[in-house]
Amino acid sequence: MEGTGEYTIPTHTRYVGEMKDGMFHGKGVLHFPNGSKYEGTWEKGICKEGKYTFSDGLKYKETDWDYCDGKDRRFYSERCNGLKPAGESQLTDPDPPRVIPDGCYDTGDGFYDPNTRVVKGYDGNFLRNAASLQDGGSQRAQTLKRHAKRNHVPCGRMFLGGEERGTSPTTVVEQ
């Protein structure tokens, strides 16, 4: 890739800008699926300087950052448009809030349905599968747990090279 163009990576992040030898080089903008963007100057694939803008228009500042600093906990839209009258609460930055089906959870880029273990976009289109912690996680974790039981290795301890490296109730055991 050489010159000015557009490149979309598998995460649906889109780069629009200058490239050289197959790398980001020169001025360019990364557009993220959630609507935020990073405008920068790149040199051989490494960003040398840039500015991040959140999807709601808030621009990140490395110095003098006063948004959500503990003293002022308003949403960005409340800072821009003012607070609602007494008795009316704003529960999310987007107002009105996004519609999430009952029993589902907001993931920032869509919603997670625990019954189907699928994350869908706010438009209802499939985004990704999600493993359920209730089911013990991935197939690999299940295999390792069975191996640990068969070899009488206590769950919660990890052994690497015969040496115990740490304990955690969620650590999967493998010898």
Image (tube, rainbow, N blue to C red):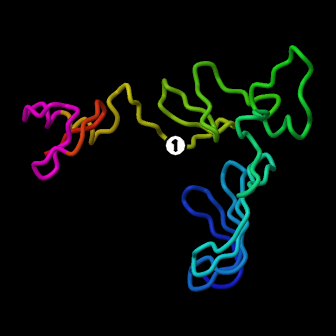
Horizontal side of residue 102 vs 84, given as left or right = left
Q: Residue at coordinates 72% horizontally, 53% vertically from top-left?
A: 36
Q: Position of residue 27 (x, y in %)?
A: 73, 76
Magenta run includes residue 120: no
Q: Which residue of the protein is positioned furthest toward the left in this rendering?
A: 151
Horizontal side of residue 89 vs 132, given as left or right = right
Q: How many marks?
A: 1
At label 1, the amino acid type is: Arg
The residue that disc 1 covers is 128
Q: Quadrant of residue 43?
A: bottom right
**SS for dot 1:** strand
Magenta-colored span: 146-164
Nearest the viewer among 38 and 168 is: 168
Q: Residue at coordinates 59% horizontally, 27% vertically from top-left?
A: 105
Q: Residue at coordinates 55% horizontally, 31% vertically from top-left?
A: 112
Q: Position of residue 103 (x, y in %)?
A: 58, 19
Horizontal side of residue 142 vs 61, given as left or right = left
Position of 108 relative to 114 (above/below):
below
Q: Residues within 10 Å of mark 1 (few under 14, many from 20)?
A: few
Position of 139 relative to 57 (above/below):
above
Q: Position of residue 97 (x, y in %)?
A: 77, 29
Question: What is the quadrant of the N terminus in the image?
Answer: bottom right
Nearest the viewer among 83 and 147 is: 83
Position of 11 relative to 105 (above/below):
below
Q: Which residue of the protein is positioned furthest toward the top in this rendering?
A: 87
Question: What is the quadrant of the C terminus in the image?
Answer: top left
Horizontal side of residue 166 vs 10, given as left or right = left
